[in-house]
Image (spheres, grey):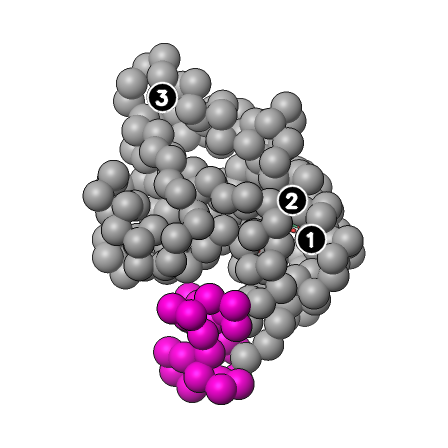
């Protein structure tokens, strides 16, 4: 199963993605996490991406598009994948569509989590990252995934915050990119929505991101 996952930053997309990854045993490919790993590892890609990420800007397409298309070619993606954080603008959507068609890979599901911008903003500021595993969601403002004291609720590991999660200006910028339905991330979601309506091969589903983690998962799994 090949899935594209959309939702504003802070909508719980990463949390739901981690659940789907385990349920369907497919890799959860997060563009933002790939950048963060590269920054942590001190790679050239990481140093190029960092200045954009810290400000809440998109990393340029010349860097991001080949990075993701390359990741989708890896062996573990043969059994399916869940792509999260890409595409983020209309150009990325068109390139992804084109390269999937060229490779003869079908996109099965496009899921969009719908959430009010202010709620999403609060959730971002409460987010904590587990230093052991990026797929261990913790958030001080969400009861279902509240950390265990100051430690990861899943493994007891150390928690950190992302610099771009504590900077209100950077959050506003990221959200303006997401909610832009002309050229931004919603435009890229709607690109696939119109393909789904035209061709009927892709299933486009929407989810209400406001309820708790468990309820959103139930809605997601029931619609897949
Ligand atoms: P995220 O973890 O999805 O919030 O991504 C963190 C940051 O990585 C974003 O604010 C961007 O700077 C960068 N990034 C992630 N995905 C993309 C993408 N598809 N295109 C450009 N930049 C991206």
Q: In the rendered image, which quarter is residue 193 located in?
A: top left
Residues under numbered marks 2 and 1 in contact, where contact means CB atoms less than 8 Å apart: yes
Q: Which residue is mark 3?
A: 196
Q: For residue 171, which numbered disc appears in the image?
A: 1
Q: Which residue is mark 2?
A: 175
Tell which of 197 and 101 is nearer to you. 197
Give the dominant element type of the magenta stretch: helix, strand or loop: loop
> Which quadrant of the rendered structure holds the N terminus?
top left
Question: Magenta part of the protein: which range?
Answer: 129-158
**x and y percentages locating residue 84 in the rendered image:** 46, 47
For the point 31% across and 54% down, the residue is 215
Q: CA distance from mark 2 to mark 1?
A: 6 Å
Q: CA distance from mark 3 to mark 2?
A: 25 Å
For the point 71% across and 48% down, the residue is 172
**x and y percentages locating residue 71 in the rendered image:** 46, 48
Which element is circle 2 on? helix
* Residue 88 visible in the current orientation: yes
């Amino acid at each position: 199963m090949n899935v594209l996952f959309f939702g504003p930053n802070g909508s719980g997309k990463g949390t739901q993605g981690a659940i789907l990854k385990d349920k369907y045993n497919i890799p959860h490919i997060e563009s933002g996490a790939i950048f963060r790993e590269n920054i942590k590892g001190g790679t050239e890609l990481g140093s190029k991406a960092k200045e954009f990420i810290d400000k809440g800007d998109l990393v340029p397409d010349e860097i991001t598009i080949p990075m993701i298309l390359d990741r989708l070619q890896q062996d573990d993606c043969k059994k399916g994948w869940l792509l999260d954080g890409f595409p983020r603008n209309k150009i990325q959507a068109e390139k992804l569509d084109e390269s999937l068609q060229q490779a003869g890979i079908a996109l099965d599901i496009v899921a969009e989590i719908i959430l009010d911008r202010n709620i999403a903003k609060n959730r971002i500021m409460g987010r904590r990252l587990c230093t052991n595993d990026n797929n261990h969601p913790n958030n001080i403002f969400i009861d279902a995934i509240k950390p265990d004291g100051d430690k990861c609720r899943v493994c007891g590991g150390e928690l950190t915050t992302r610099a771009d999660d504590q900077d209100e200006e950077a959050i506003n910028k990221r959200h303006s990119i997401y909610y832009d339905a002309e050229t931004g991330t919603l435009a890229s979601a709607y690109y696939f929505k119109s393909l789904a309506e035209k061709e009927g091969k892709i299933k486009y589903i929407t989810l209400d991101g406001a309820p708790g983690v468990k309820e959103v998962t139930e809605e997601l799994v029931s619609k897949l």
